Image (tube, helix red, strand yellow):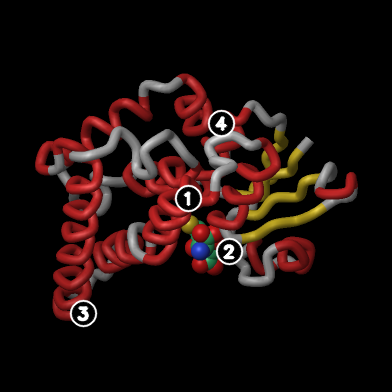
Amino acid sequence: MIELHTWNTPNGRKVSIALEEMGLPYSVHTVNISKDEQFAPDFLRISPNNRIPAIIDPDGPGGTAISVFESGAILIYLGQKTGQFWPADIRAQVPVLEWLMWQMGGFGPMLGQVHHFLQVEDEQDRKYGLARYTKETRRLYGVADRRLANVEFFAGALSIADFAILGWAWRHERHLIDLAEFPHVKRWYETLMARPAVQRGFEVALS
Ligand SMILES: N[C@@H](CCC(=O)N[C@@H](CS)C(=O)NCC(=O)O)C(=O)O
């Protein structure tokens, strides 16, 4: 059984969604990042960047255990392991990687900055950062909306890229986004949230 070391955050949810969608049995090992458990030596051995999520697959390549950190790397690993939500054809892999990297590099880091600056109490300290990252977040939702005007899912067929993006879109209210302004994202979001496995991925206790 795969060990999922995680916490109840957007990056953590990406992996519980993928594991549920792929039908892989897993056990949850909580890492309470508000209590600095991500710095514990045992966790750092599998996640040297002291961030959740990380997994240990006892049945890794060659039948021996493997650990993986970074949510994007975990999703690719699981996609390759199962052959699900990850196309075999290299041409079809390109859009999956493009949209997964788009999420990892932007639609996550930028949105997380909005969450951060909203918590800054001093208005002068909050103002510039909140304006900058809110603008960038809206730009990214616009990019997503234009993409989803032409395709059902980010890479055409449902893929690990959708699970990665969904983990963050799940927090749209927190980063001040009204999905009604991005109708194609809204349609995609509601389609995914109606999937029983996605619902299980969000319901499983991660904290
Ligand atoms: N690029 C990393 C980011 C992971 C990340 O930022 N995790 C946060 C929670 S969402 C964390 O563990 N924070 C702990 C800390 O900041 O010390 C990934 O996608 O796995």
Q: Which residue is mark 1?
A: 91
Expressed as whole percent of the image width and height from the top left, the position of residue 23 reads 64, 26
Q: What's the amino acid at mark 3?
A: Asp
For label 3, count other residues whose C-alpha is less than 10 Å away and answer few (under 14), some (14-19) or many (20+): few
> Are the residues flagged by discs 3 and 2 in contact, CB closer than 8 Å?
no
- Mark 2 and mark 1 lie on one chain; the one further toward the N terminus is 2
- N-terminal of the two: label 4 or label 1? 1
Which numbered tag is attached to residue 51? 2
Residue at image point 30% right, 33% down = 152
Asked if residue 207 can be seen in this view, the reply is no
| Helix, strand or loop for disc 3 | helix
Ligand 1 within 8 A of label 2's CB?
yes
Left or right: 108 as drawn, with respect to 94:
left
* Badge 4 element: loop
Q: Secondary structure at mark 2?
A: loop
Name the kind of residue labelled 1 in the image.
Answer: Arg
Q: Pick whichever, 193 or 43, lies toward us.
A: 193
What residue does disc 3 label? 125
Is 136 positioned to the left or the right of 71 in the image? left
Does residue 203 lie above or below 175 as drawn? Answer: above
Amino acid at dot 4? Val
Say what secondary structure mark 1 lies in: helix
Q: Note whether 143 is above or below 22 in the view shown.
A: below
Residue 187 at x, y percent in the picture: 23, 30
Task: Choose between 116 and 163: the one closer to the eye.
Answer: 163
**Are discs 2 and 4 less than 8 Å apart at CB?**
no
For residue 204, the mark is 4
Residue ID at (60%, 54%): 53
Q: Does the residue at mark 2 contact the one at mark 1 (Cβ under 8 Å)? A: no
